[in-house]
Amino acid sequence: MHRAPLLGLSLLLLAQSGPGADDPLAYVDPEIGTAHSRWFFYTPAAVPYGMAKLAPSTNGHEGNPSGWEAVGYDARHESIAGFVHSHEWQIGGVCFMPTTGELQTSPGDLSDPASGYRSRFKREKQISQAGFYQVHLDDYGITAELTATKRVGFHRYTFPASDSAHILLDIGNKQGESSEVTAASVRMVDDLHFEGFVRTYPKYVERYDPQGSVTMYFHGVLDKKPAGVTAFNHKGVFEGKKSIDGKGAGLALNYATKEGEKIGIKVGLSYTSIAAAKANLQAEAASLSFDEAKAAAQNEWRKAFGRIAIEDESVSNKTKFYTGLFHALLGRGVACDVSGDYPKFDGSTGHFPEGADDPKRQFINSDAIWGGYWNLTQLWALSYPEWYSSFVHTQMTIYRDRGWFADGFANSAYASGVGTNMVGLAIAGAYQTGILEGDMEPVYEAVRKNELGWKDRPVGAGKADVKAFVERGYVPFHPEDRTDPEGSNFASSHTLEYSFSAHAAAQMALDLGKNDDHDELSRLAKGWRHLFNPENRYIQPKTADGNFIDRFNPQEAWRGFQEGNAVQYSFFVPHQPVALIEAIGRDEFNQRLNRIFEVSEKDDFSGGQTIDAFAGVQSLYNHGNQPCLHISWLFNFSGKPWLTQKWTRRICDRFYGTDPVHGYGRGQDEDQGQLGAWFVMASLGIFDVKGLTDSRPIVELGSPLFEKATVQLGKEKTLVIETANHSAENVYVQSASFDGEPLDRCWLFWDELAAGGTLRFTLGAQPREDWGVETPPPGF
């Protein structure tokens, strides 16, 4: 029998006792926000940035028509149709399900659990934690448990007495965002080992990289030999057959079980080959028991959460904080093997000679970084720099392999989430915050090409209309649903985004002595001015002839603005906030923006009671989507920092909830940790509307939510954020100090904050309107 070492034994005892009151895991509730959530949102049995992300599926086999809609696990559903290993943007597959009784090989309908192998369950018999999941399958009397290492999934099924127990390996069917299966295979290697693959053609790969595909490989080991094996696929069921190919391919492992008998499975995963999946299993879990894996996974989460330690009496706020941090650290997953191999877009394999041990050089899968500069990249820069570095490492690898950055990607295949590309801006932020190391010339050239390059630009690299932007300074409006070198139906939002990212690249060019580039990019950073209508003081789409469009309704969504409207997007000039404030007029700016928040509070700053990803798209303010996430911080630039304090606190209180329906708004798109990371930054009271892209970045200050936060910074520095007179009502800063010195600014330079120290706020119930006003933050 394998014996756990002393460290493993201590972890095992800790895991068996469950999270205590001082354990951050006690404040992580993966069930929050699961009503109408995305495929990758709910994966409790995983480690930070893991490849193996195990979770129950209630409707994942249904897929979704457009490739992004809510699917997978929904807290309102009452039956489970298997446990799936892979949950990433455009990636889903490898589903297992334990059953008893007559063999059924299809999951059946959600409305009729008896129509397939799915099982009803009760939520009071479900345990969902960071790193562990357990549920009782009522229809079969089976308890299922899941946990994981980075690349290995663990299952443990406790069966009743049965002479017809089964474990289904449902491989050849779509799951979540995977879309249709194009090839699949599974076989028993011997009595205890099985292996195979599933290849899919996701909707966004089909749209942006038609020659691409996504393949998931696996190699698993059972701890009990099945009494028999049955194969199945879309053509039928084949008793006694131990291998099968094609759509719907799967195996049923058949057992006779005793009451309380446990059967365990370990499953190594890979995106490059079956051999690599086997090697990942051997490297990470060859001698690891389920309980040891669970203990190690939860300890890994404790270490990750421990970088930001919160001290406060509010259970609700700590739950919002650590659950948000959980999603921020879960949203993306490694795609490289322990050997350093990684999947290339054409199905071949790339290799990093240094292997996969360097935490700064992981190759990951990721949805678009659209909006991530207002949450994830700031959190990464603050306390998780290795993952910021890995994001850049991945993008530079794709750039070297393909010649362009990828907006969103799945196994190196272009899978652009929104058709734009803000990667250069995110990389510029990494440069400005000191994340990057080595020669900056190739990094800068890649950033420059992303901003200015249009010749032979593939559709998967996004910004198909950048030619028009570079030549005209703005993107002309197309009334049709299309984006091409001459314009776009999302022309105005694209112009604003490209202006922002041009500013980021310009600052990088300035630092590297690229003066001509700096001048050109700085010109483009003013592109928003072309669309600013001085008569109504809104950003308004323009046609190619230079005229503003007619029949303009500022609250009309989608006409010129992606996932938003002119009311929301007219504040999307984060890189030049002072110029925007002057263009609107300071008094008008403050009155308009404050009124927007007063009205929006009634709908919890999104779509109110409507459960939908786009519930707030026509609202005045929509915290449930990226374009609005910086707006509440703009009062720091307009002479009203107390309104930033007020409204960021109100958003934390009202938009964010602690139940399955009201979690991140109501059914809105948390988007791989973006909304969770925003709460983390806002509750700490630090944020930068410019995404840390200035030549000398700053952070704006808000109203910290907690009594004390101890933040582990990079380079072994520590930042302590404390509040005096802390209460739910005391949201306004009365005074502040940094390392004992009075602070009368509502901002700090990033390098000051990154050096560590103690940032202390005294709070009160009434605004102190003169604090932080005399020296406003730099706003270009």
Image (tube, rainbow, N blue to C red):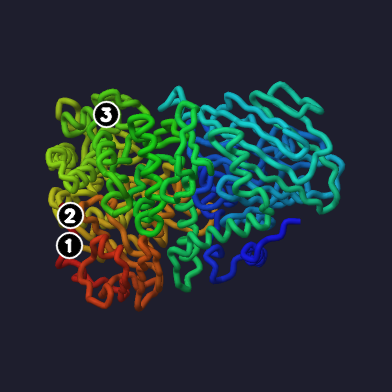
Cα distance between the residues tagged 1 and 3: 36 Å
Question: To which residue does mark 2 refer?
Answer: 779
Nearer to me, 434 or 464: 434
Answer whether residue 188 is visible to the viewer in this image.
yes
Q: Quadrant of residue 700?
A: bottom left
Please, is residue 502 above or below residue 29 in the view?
A: above
Dot 1 crowding, Cα within 10 Å, few <14, some 14–19, many 20+: some
Look at label 2 and name its amino acid.
Gly
Q: Is residue 416 left or right of residue 86?
A: left
Image label count: 3
Cα distance between the residues tagged 1 and 2: 8 Å
Residue ID at (49%, 41%): 340
Look at label 3 and name its amino acid.
Asp
Specify the label residue 465 is tagged with: 3
Residue ID at (64%, 67%): 10
Look at label 1 and name its amino acid.
Pro
Residue ID at (15%, 25%): 545
Specify the label residue 776 is tagged with: 1
